[in-house]
């Protein structure tokens, strides 16, 4: 299974800086053996694509999408619009959106299904908060979030969907989740996929880890069974540092 690394800029970099990031990243040595994507703000997608030119690395990702094809949804962007633009992946249900914008499990499921129908790979973010972790509710929360996200998804396609396990207490805190704990969480996610679909699909779906990943700890995750990549926030903002992280993830 190919490793997947996604840079998540969050709400950083307008068009000018986005273009500069892509150009600087492209000047670096980039491993072809892994899949690399960059999730940029919608207004910066055009600049990122223009700086990419004909290059296909990194793939373009969106940080959000609505579920309907078109209509009276002021401020939203549809999966079809993103597809038309050449976006290949889209984050869904990032914990910041769940917490700050009221995104529910049901909305996450609708978005994931709509993206998949439009030919974009949904990268569904799930994970417990600190209180839930302390109460020993990790597995329960994950099963609930994953099951809801899978509701409208189809098992077809080479990469039908991706899950990102992002424990909320580890995001932007420097408190990376121990790789062994991430492995256990990824097993719970795979078990929920198996329950809904099949063991063969559960084995095929990439489950990546996110939360304070950097060049120092990436190898630990990548070498852990069942961890198929990473969603990288803070450590992706510097293009050279992120390129170094990508090379570190691919020691070949
Ligand atoms: P972080 O963010 O790498 O800055 O912890 C990860 C994320 O929120 O996707």
Image: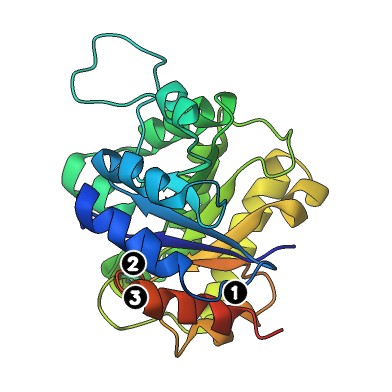
The residue tagged with tag 1: helix, strand or loop? Answer: helix
* Residue 53 against residue 235 in the figure, above or below: above
* Residue 188 against residue 157 in the figure, above or below: below
Q: Quadrant of ligand 1?
A: bottom left
* Residue 157 in the figure: left or right of residue 173: right
- Numbered tag placed on residue 206 in the rendering: none
* Residue 100 visible in the picture: yes
**Considering depth in this image, is 48 or 89 the residue closer to the camera?**
48
Q: Which residue is mark 3?
A: 235
Q: Which residue is drawn at the image coordinates 71% and 35% (left, top)?
A: 155
State if disc 3 and disc 2 touch (CB < 8 Å): yes
Q: Which residue is mark 2?
A: 233
Looking at mark 3, is its residue's CB closer than 8 Å to ligand 1?
yes
Q: Which residue is drawn at the image coordinates 69% and 76% (left, top)?
A: 225
Q: Which residue is mark 1?
A: 183
User: Looking at the image, which residue sits at the far top?
Assistant: 71
* Residue 59 against residue 71 in the figure, above or below: below
């Amino acid at each position: 299974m190919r490793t997947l690394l996604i840079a998540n800029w969050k709400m950083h970099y307008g068009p000018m800086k986005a273009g500069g990031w892509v150009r600087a990243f492209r000047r670096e040595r980039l491993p072809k053996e892994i899949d690399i994507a960059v999730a940029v703000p919608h207004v910066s997608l055009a600049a990122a694509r223009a700086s990419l030119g004909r290059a296909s690395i990194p793939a373009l990702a969106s940080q959000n999408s609505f579920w309907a094809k078109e209509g009276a949804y002021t401020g939203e962007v549809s999966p079809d619009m993103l597809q038309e633009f050449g976006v290949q992946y889209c984050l869904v249900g990032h914990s910041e959106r769940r917490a700050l914008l009221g995104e529910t499990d049901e909305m996450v499921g609708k978005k994931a299904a709509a993206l998949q129908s439009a030919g974009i790979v949904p990268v569904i973010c799930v994970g417990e908060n600190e209180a839930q972790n302390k109460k020993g509710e990790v597995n329960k929360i994950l099963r609930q979030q994953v099951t809801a996200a899978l509701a409208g998804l189809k098992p077809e396609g080479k990469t039908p969907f991706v899950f990102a396990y992002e424990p909320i207490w580890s995001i932007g805190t420097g408190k990376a989740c121990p790789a062994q704990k991430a492995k256990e969480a990824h097993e719970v996610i795979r078990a929920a996929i198996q329950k809904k679909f099949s063991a063969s699909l559960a084995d095929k779906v990439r489950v990546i880890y996110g939360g304070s990943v950097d060049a120092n700890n990436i190898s630990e995750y990548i070498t852990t069974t069942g961890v198929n990549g990473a969603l990288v926030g803070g450590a992706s903002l510097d293009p050279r540092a992120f390129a170094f992280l990508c090379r570190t993830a691919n020691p070949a």
